[in-house]
Amino acid sequence: MRGPGLRPGHRARLKQEFGLDKPVWQQYLTYMGNVFTGDFGTAFNGQPVTELMANAFPVTIRLTVVAILFEIVIGISLGVVTGLKRGRPVDTTVLLLTLVVLSVPTFVTGLLIQLLLGVKWGWIKPAVSPEATFDELIVPGLVLASVSLAYVTRLTRTSIAENKRADYVRTAVAKGLPRRRVISRHLLRNSLIPVVTFIGADVGALMGGAIATERIFNIHGVGYQLYQGIVRQSTQTVVGFVTVLVLVFLLANLIVDLLYAVLDPRIRYA
Amino acid sequence: MVRRLARPAPQPGLHRLRPGHPLPGGHRHLAVPDRLRRPLDCDLSKAQEGSQPGHPFGFNGQGCDVYTRTVYGARASIQVGVFATLGVALLGSVLGGLAGFFGGAWDGFLSRITDIFFAIPVVLGGLVLLSVVTSATVWPVIGFMVLLGWPQIARIARGSVITAKQNDYVQAARALGASNSRMLLRHITPNAVAPVIVVATIALGTYIALEATLSYLGVGLKPPTVSWGIDISSASQYIRNAPHMLLWPAGALAITVLAFIMLGDAVRDALDPKLR
């Protein structure tokens, strides 16, 4: 802004264009008024923030969906298996594995997987293309999910192991239900409440916390835009994206609350 | 003797020596290899070379010895972990403990504050707050972790103080006329401190990992400091040609974090058999 090519009137015109010549409270009111009509302002490079969002959010939502699917499918299955076979070799092995996953930071896992699968063995493309289709996002999604996956496994395991001795499970076995049905209908359903709580809170964390993962795999999603916004001090971008992330976080928690009633019919919202 | 000296064993204090400084004890003429006198010095001609005699972990992109840097990196990383945990544990247990003991308006206020802090994504908050810091020391990073970490401990401390407060022996102490401070320090604290210690121990490992993540994103510790996070971050540019530069500090980091998680589990088993 203070470069040699800046003519005297130019600075004033730019200030006026971005509304920086008005008092702060007026800037704030204008901004909030615009937000409620769906206008998140313009980044300093001239791109409207909504346009950045329209490009970034679909990518990150796909990435988050992949990650959550991994958490649900792999995390809960491993949790059920280990919880039922507590103390057996399977249990010990999986527990050790979760500890290892927990202790390696996500960005290290990401770099190593990118090196092995992408560069050395050539199974995947090391960088994700701008379209970021689902099949390209499988490996980044797994990396993003890895730490939460370990938590989901441990949570499910504890919960299953605790409920396994409950009276209703003994009743279900005693009345001759097949083992499959006892586990899926009676045991699992009652054990899922803490897990669903965790996954719900995780949706927000995954969407905003994918900064490192998106940087490694060159995914141009929310984390990437936030990182750029912070590095380039583009307030509009950062505030706009964080506002939407908070809304997503609240929505996810609302869905979790509603899911409680599905899992446990005793919980009712009148 | 010479063999023993030739190993890149880091010796406390040696890294502070400037070129031409006499060694401690005045052994100015001792035939010490130059690299041992300044173990963090680098030789650009050896950049990215792999393992070789005397340099078991090879060299990094600037030709620095990876083994030496991995050993020195423990200082900054453990410093961040220990001081952040101490700060978080002290601040969190004092604020949370007082809120749990006295209850009332202060308790409600504190609970809302912790809610607000819980809603801030850690990595995002770190990017915003630490991107304005220019200091190269470990303290801004520690301060940031204390700022965002204390609500976790405060909640736990509050809960366990409320549980301990209802015990008969606390009521007995109150009936005998004990002052608030005596009840808190002599009767409640010893019975409420276990969960705080457990969570703090596990958190220590995660703070070390968080430091590495922040350094990887370029807002954590900064280059004159030697830390695992900085080394992993700079090694990630060379990962295709020389992965050893990344694997050694990352391995040290992972083992340290794992060790603290397992220590936390062991402390929990020792202090609180009910939680098993």
Image (cartoon, rainbow, N blue to C red):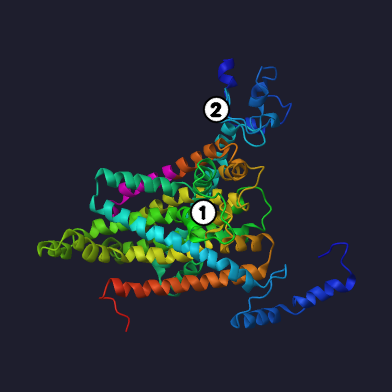
Q: Which residue is more in the foreground, A152 or A118?
A: A118
Q: Give the letter of the chain under mark 2.
A: B
Q: Give the letter of the chain under mark 1.
A: B
Q: Is residue A33 shown in magenta?
A: no
On the image, the x and y values in percent for residue A202 come to: 44, 63
Residue depicted at x 61% and y 63%: A226
Specify the quadrant of the image occupied by residue A80.
bottom left
Specify the quadrant of the image occupied by residue B101.
bottom left
On the image, the x and y values in percent for residue A78 come to: 32, 53
Q: Is residue A22 left or right of residue B119?
A: right
For residue B95, say whether it is visible: no
Helix, strand or loop for disc 2? loop
**Do tag 1 and tag 2 residues touch (Cβ < 8 Å)?**
no
Q: Which numbered tag is attached to residue B87? A: 1
Specify the quadrant of the image occupied by residue A36.
bottom right
* Magenta: main secondary structure: helix
Q: Which residue is more in the foreground, B13 or A222?
A: A222
Q: Which residue is more in the foreground, A202 or A218?
A: A218
Residue depicted at x 30% and y 52%: B272
Helix, strand or loop for disc 1? helix
For residue B130, say whether it is visible: yes
Locate the N terminus of chain B and report the quarter of the image it occupies: top right
Residue identifier under label 2: B56
Disc 1 marks a residue whose amino acid type is Gly
For the record, the magenta segment spans B258-276
- Number of labels in the image equals 2
Residue depicted at x 58% and y 32%: B68
Q: Nearer the viewer, mark 1 or mark 2?
A: 2
Disc 2 marks a residue whose amino acid type is Pro
On the image, the x and y values in percent for residue A14 come to: 80, 73
